[in-house]
Image (cartoon, rainbow, N blue to C red):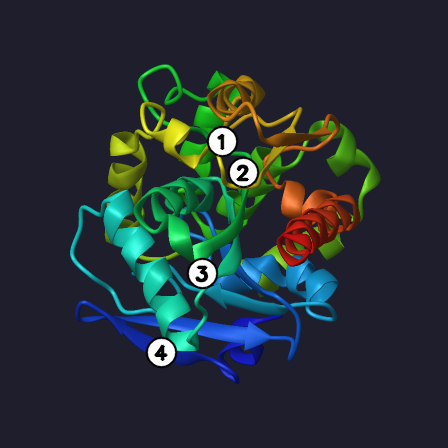
């Protein structure tokens, strides 16, 4: 889904003076809100939208400063980003939704759950962490590739992004040309450096580990890509210790780009998770 296709059905809602762009796919079923990570537009969820929209109403949106959402001065906080996500729920008149976040979007999802527990049917956290000094330093390889993906020309950034998101074994066997085309179509040009810096500031200040016990009654799925070089897989293990009721999905051959690398396995797990939660709610 390129930028123009995504914009054809885009709507905007106001979040304290900032216009947030969002869209909905699917006409029936329990609502699902997908929250994207750092510097990525909402349309990067394309493979999940395709896999879920036949069963669910699926909302995607651009975080402030990204894609079709308005630019806003930084630095940002997770509370601000969570307020933007809640504003999308309000604009859709969704009283509750299954909330899914990846990477920085998983941090936003944690904050949204802590601030607005009554709005979540369930929570899914993919390749993310609970913050703090122990969580911040990625693998040295991931740190290098993240830096390379933020600078240089479009081709150089694209190559660095591939190596950041996907393990070497996957890159060796996939169609690299097709992968690059899909990344270009889904992600487009990166947002301004000021937006990326503002989002990084939010990540650096993110800390929920002391509060996550408040979510002990929230049905939660944790997704652990075993070859992630940006968010250490051990950080997902820490999340499980903080959320001992959560179910853990291990995708040991996947990297940080798990939503693109293994969409079928991930989508099936999401569908099963949502169905179990909704079925239990009906039974009660």
Comes first in the chain, label 1 or label 3? 1
> Residue 160's mark?
2
Left or right, 134 with reference to 274:
left
Which residue is the extreme one toward the right?
A: 173
Mark 1 — residue?
145
Q: CA distance from mark 2 to mark 1?
A: 5 Å
Identify the residue at horizontal 45%, vertical 26% (top origin): 144
Mark 3 — residue?
189
Residue 96, x across and y down, in percent = 47, 62
Q: Is residue 37 shown above or below 128?
A: below
Comes first in the chain, label 4 or label 3? 4
Q: Nearer the viewer, residue 94 or 250?
A: 94
Q: CA distance from mark 3 to mark 2?
A: 14 Å
Whether the residues at callouts 2 and 1 have beta carbons within 8 Å, the answer is yes
Q: CA distance from mark 1 to mark 3?
A: 17 Å
Mark 4 — residue?
12
Disc 1 is placed on an element classified as helix
Q: How many numbered badges does the structure rendering display?
A: 4
Q: Is residue 210 shown above or below 123?
A: above
């Amino acid at each position: 889904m390129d930028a123009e296709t995504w914009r054809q059905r885009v709507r905007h809602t106001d979040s304290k003076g900032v216009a947030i762009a969002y869209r909905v796919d699917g006409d029936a079923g329990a609502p699902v809100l997908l929250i994207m990570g750092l510097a990525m537009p909402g349309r990067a969820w394309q493979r999940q939208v395709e896999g879920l929209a036949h069963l669910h109403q699926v909302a995607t949106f651009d975080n402030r400063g990204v894609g079709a959402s308005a630019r806003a001065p930084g630095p940002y906080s997770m509370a601000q980003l969570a307020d933007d996500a809640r504003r999308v729920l309000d604009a859709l008149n969704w009283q509750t939704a299954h909330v899914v976040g990846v990477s920085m979007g998983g941090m936003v999802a944690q904050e949204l759950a802590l601030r607005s527990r009554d709005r979540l049917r369930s929570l899914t956290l993919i390749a993310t962490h609970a913050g703090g000094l122990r969580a911040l330093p990625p693998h040295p390889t991931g740190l290098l590739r993240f830096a390379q993906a933020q600078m240089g020309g479009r081709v150089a950034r694209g190559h660095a992004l591939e190596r950041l998101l996907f393990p070497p074994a996957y890159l060796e066997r996939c169609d690299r040309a097709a992968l690059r085309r899909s990344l270009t179509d889904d992600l487009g040009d990166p947002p301004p450096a000021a937006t990326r810096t503002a989002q990084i500031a939010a990540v650096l200040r993110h800390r929920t580990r002391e509060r996550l016990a408040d979510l002990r009654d929230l049905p939660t799925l944790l997704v652990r890509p075993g070859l992630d070089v940006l968010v250490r897989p051990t950080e997902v293990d820490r999340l499980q210790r903080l959320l001992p009721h959560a179910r853990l999905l291990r995708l040991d051959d996947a990297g940080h780009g798990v939503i693109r690398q293994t969409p079928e396995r991930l989508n099936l797990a999401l569908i099963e998770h949502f169905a179990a939660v909704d079925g239990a709610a009906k039974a009660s």
